[in-house]
Protein backbone atom coordinates (compact mmCIF):
# COMPACT_ATOMS: atom_id res chain seq x y z
CA UNK A 1 0.00 0.00 0.00
CA UNK A 2 2.82 2.43 0.80
CA UNK A 3 4.35 1.93 -2.64
CA UNK A 4 1.09 2.83 -4.36
CA UNK A 5 0.64 5.82 -2.08
CA UNK A 6 4.14 7.08 -2.90
CA UNK A 7 3.46 6.63 -6.63
CA UNK A 8 0.19 8.57 -6.45
CA UNK A 9 1.78 11.28 -4.33
CA UNK A 10 4.71 11.77 -6.70
CA UNK A 11 2.49 11.79 -9.80
CA UNK A 12 -0.03 14.22 -8.31
CA UNK A 13 2.78 16.46 -7.02
CA UNK A 14 4.15 16.71 -10.56
CA UNK A 15 0.67 17.56 -11.85
CA UNK A 16 0.23 20.19 -9.11
CA UNK A 17 3.56 21.85 -9.93
CA UNK A 18 2.70 21.85 -13.64
CA UNK A 19 -0.74 23.37 -13.00
CA UNK A 20 0.68 26.13 -10.80
CA UNK A 21 3.44 26.83 -13.34
CA UNK A 22 0.98 27.05 -16.26
CA UNK A 23 -1.34 29.28 -14.20
CA UNK A 24 1.52 31.61 -13.26
CA UNK A 25 2.83 31.86 -16.81
CA UNK A 26 -0.72 32.21 -18.14
CA UNK A 27 -1.49 35.07 -15.79
CA UNK A 28 1.71 36.83 -16.82
CA UNK A 29 1.01 36.23 -20.50
CA UNK A 30 4.37 34.47 -20.89
CA UNK A 31 3.20 30.94 -21.69
CA UNK A 32 4.05 30.40 -25.36
CA UNK A 33 1.75 28.45 -27.64
CA UNK A 34 2.91 24.85 -27.53
CA UNK A 35 1.86 21.24 -28.00
CA UNK A 36 2.42 20.11 -24.42
CA UNK A 37 0.72 22.26 -21.78
CA UNK A 38 -2.05 24.80 -21.58
CA UNK A 39 -5.57 25.25 -22.89
CA UNK A 40 -5.13 23.89 -26.38
CA UNK A 41 -8.15 24.26 -28.63
CA UNK A 42 -8.58 25.55 -32.16
CA UNK A 43 -9.73 28.93 -30.83
CA UNK A 44 -6.92 29.30 -28.27
CA UNK A 45 -4.27 28.39 -30.83
CA UNK A 46 -5.64 30.74 -33.49
CA UNK A 47 -3.32 33.58 -32.46
CA UNK A 48 -0.97 34.69 -29.72
CA UNK A 49 -3.61 37.13 -28.51
CA UNK A 50 -6.24 34.37 -28.22
CA UNK A 51 -3.75 32.10 -26.42
CA UNK A 52 -2.88 34.82 -23.91
CA UNK A 53 -6.53 35.76 -23.33
CA UNK A 54 -7.48 32.11 -22.79
CA UNK A 55 -4.79 31.51 -20.22
CA UNK A 56 -5.46 34.71 -18.35
CA UNK A 57 -9.14 33.80 -18.19
CA UNK A 58 -8.45 30.24 -17.02
CA UNK A 59 -5.50 30.92 -14.70
CA UNK A 60 -7.46 31.04 -11.44
CA UNK A 61 -9.10 27.71 -12.17
CA UNK A 62 -5.78 26.22 -13.27
CA UNK A 63 -4.44 27.19 -9.83
CA UNK A 64 -7.47 25.54 -8.24
CA UNK A 65 -6.83 22.38 -10.23
CA UNK A 66 -3.28 22.46 -8.87
CA UNK A 67 -4.75 22.57 -5.38
CA UNK A 68 -6.82 19.50 -6.25
CA UNK A 69 -3.70 17.67 -7.39
CA UNK A 70 -1.91 18.69 -4.19
CA UNK A 71 -4.88 17.38 -2.19
CA UNK A 72 -4.64 14.05 -4.02
CA UNK A 73 -0.91 13.96 -3.23
CA UNK A 74 -1.10 14.85 0.46
CA UNK A 75 -4.47 13.99 1.99
CA UNK A 76 -4.18 10.20 1.64
CA UNK A 77 -1.18 10.19 3.99
CA UNK A 78 -3.40 11.36 6.85
CA UNK A 79 -5.41 8.14 6.49
CA UNK A 80 -2.41 6.13 7.68
CA UNK A 81 -3.22 7.31 11.20
CA UNK A 82 -6.67 5.69 11.00
CA UNK A 83 -7.54 2.18 12.17
CA UNK A 84 -6.67 -0.51 9.61
CA UNK A 85 -10.22 -1.38 8.47
CA UNK A 86 -11.01 2.18 7.38
CA UNK A 87 -7.55 3.10 6.10
CA UNK A 88 -7.77 1.96 2.47
CA UNK A 89 -11.29 3.29 1.78
CA UNK A 90 -10.28 6.63 3.28
CA UNK A 91 -7.16 6.76 1.10
CA UNK A 92 -9.26 6.01 -1.98
CA UNK A 93 -11.81 8.70 -1.12
CA UNK A 94 -9.07 11.28 -0.49
CA UNK A 95 -7.42 10.53 -3.83
CA UNK A 96 -10.72 10.57 -5.70
CA UNK A 97 -11.72 13.87 -4.07
CA UNK A 98 -8.45 15.50 -5.11
CA UNK A 99 -8.72 14.15 -8.65
CA UNK A 100 -12.34 15.34 -8.89
CA UNK A 101 -11.26 18.87 -7.89
CA UNK A 102 -8.38 18.68 -10.36
CA UNK A 103 -10.59 17.57 -13.24
CA UNK A 104 -13.49 19.87 -12.43
CA UNK A 105 -11.39 23.02 -12.35
CA UNK A 106 -9.34 21.92 -15.37
CA UNK A 107 -12.52 21.58 -17.41
CA UNK A 108 -13.80 24.91 -16.11
CA UNK A 109 -10.49 26.59 -17.01
CA UNK A 110 -10.80 25.16 -20.51
CA UNK A 111 -14.34 26.45 -20.91
CA UNK A 112 -13.44 29.93 -19.67
CA UNK A 113 -10.31 29.97 -21.80
CA UNK A 114 -12.20 28.87 -24.90
CA UNK A 115 -14.76 31.63 -24.39
CA UNK A 116 -12.04 34.26 -23.94
CA UNK A 117 -10.19 33.07 -27.04
CA UNK A 118 -13.39 33.18 -29.07
CA UNK A 119 -14.04 36.76 -27.97
CA UNK A 120 -10.59 37.64 -29.32
CA UNK A 121 -10.90 35.70 -32.58
CA UNK A 122 -14.47 36.84 -33.20
CA UNK A 123 -13.50 40.45 -32.53
CA UNK A 124 -15.96 41.00 -29.70
Image (cartoon, rainbow, N blue to C red):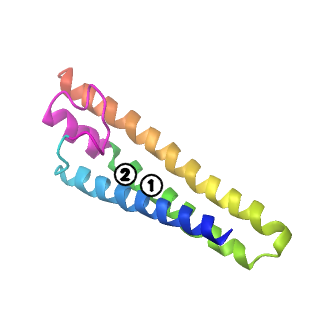
What residue does disc 1 label?
64
Question: Judging from the image, what secondary structure is the residue with disc 2 in?
Answer: helix
What residue does disc 2 label?
60
Q: Circles 1 and 2: CB distance less than 8 Å? A: yes
In three-dimensional space, the C-alpha distance between marks 1 and 2, rounded to whole angstroms, equals: 6 Å
Q: Tell me if residue 124 can be seen.
A: no
Residue most extreme to the right: 85
Which residue is found at the position 25% from the left and 39% from the top?
35
Quadrant position of the N terminus in the picture: bottom right
Q: Nearer the viewer, residue 59 or 11?
A: 11
User: Where does the magenta region start and end?
Assistant: 34-57
Q: Is residue 39 magenta?
A: yes
Q: Position of residue 47 (x, y in %)?
A: 15, 31
Judged left or right of residue 1, residue 110 is left
Picture layout, residue 34 above or below residue 16: above
Which residue is found at the position 37% from the left and 36% from the top?
112
Picture layout, residue 41 above or below residue 78: above
Q: Position of residue 5 (x, y in %)?
A: 61, 67
Q: Which image quadrant is residue 40 in?
A: top left
Amino acid sequence: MIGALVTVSVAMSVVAVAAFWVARRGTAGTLPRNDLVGIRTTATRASDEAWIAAHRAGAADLRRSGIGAAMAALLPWAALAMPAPSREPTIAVAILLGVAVLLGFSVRAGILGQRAARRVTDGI
